[in-house]
């Protein structure tokens, strides 16, 4: 039996130890915010935070999770009080299809927890998630916006175009 916490709630399972965390989240806990993308840890759609580190859940066997604390997109914040990252994602209109967004948001949340005002180089090194729609410029803007929001603890106005219109 493996015991670990997911979004602050204890979970224990008798599933085979080689079962990926992704399947435990989706099939056992019915948490569908963490997405299956590639199954080989390359795309990042399945990114969660384990003990403060962004991790590709498709690559983590549940046997390695004993005593660990996992945070999924569902555990970040209630919808009515989004985190700075989630608010920045909306303000910068990051999602296009949206499939990669939960993993991307989790990776950015972990980055900002360890580097509250990351440089573009730090972003490039830490955020290796794939966005098939190519919204990388908006993702970068949202990361910088979230860093500013976290630093000021005040809401930041929505992005505007060059003409000054939203």
Image (cartoon, grey):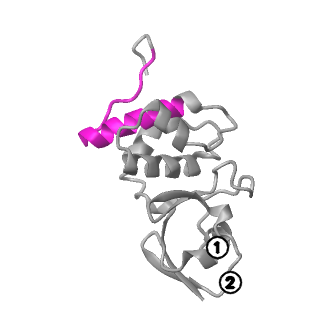
Q: Residue at horizontal 64%, vertical 51%?
A: 45
Residue range in magenta is 138-161
> Could you say where residue 137 lies in the image, as x and y percent from the top left?
55, 27
Nearest the eye: 108 or 102: 108
For the N terminus, the image quarter is: bottom right
Where does label 1 land, which residue? 24
| Residue 29 is covered by the magenta coloring | no
- Residue 147 in the image: x percent, y percent? 36, 39
Cα separation, mark 1 vs mark 2, equals 8 Å
Residue shown at the point (40%, 37%) measured from the top left:
118
How many neighbours does mark 1 have within 10 angstroms: few (below 14), some (14-19), or many (20 or more)? some
Q: Which mark is residue 15?
A: 2
Binning the other alpha carbons within 10 Å of mark 2 as few (below 14), some (14 to 19) or many (20 upward) gives few
Question: Cβ–Cβ below 8 Å for labels 1 and 2?
Answer: yes
Residue 132 percent location from the top left of the image = 70, 37
Give SS at disc 2. loop
Furthest residue in direction top, as rendered: 163
Main SS, magenta region, reads helix
Among the 4 quarters of the image, the one containing residue 17? bottom right
Position of the C terminus, as image quadrant, is top left
Compared to residue 93, the image places residue 165 above or below, namely: above
């Amino acid at each position: 039996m493996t015991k670990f916490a997911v979004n602050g709630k204890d979970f224990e399972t008798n599933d085979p130890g080689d079962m990926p965390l992704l399947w435990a989240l989706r099939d056992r806990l019915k948490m569908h915010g963490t997405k299956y993308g590639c199954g080989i840890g390359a795309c990042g759609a399945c990114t969660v935070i384990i003990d403060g580190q962004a991790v590709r859940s498709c690559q983590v066997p549940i046997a390695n999770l004993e005593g660990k604390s996992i945070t999924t997109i569902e555990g970040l914040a209630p919808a009515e009080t989004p985190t700075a990252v989630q608010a920045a994602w909306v303000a910068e209109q990051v999602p296009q299809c949206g499939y990669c967004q939960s993993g991307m948001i989790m990776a950015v949340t972990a980055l900002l927890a360890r580097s509250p005002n990351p440089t573009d180089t730090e972003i490039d090194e830490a955020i290796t998630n794939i966005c098939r729609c190519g919204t990388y410029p908006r993702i970068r803007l949202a990361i910088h916006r979230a860093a500013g929001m976290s630093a000021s603890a005040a809401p930041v106005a929505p992005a505007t175009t060059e003409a000054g219109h939203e």
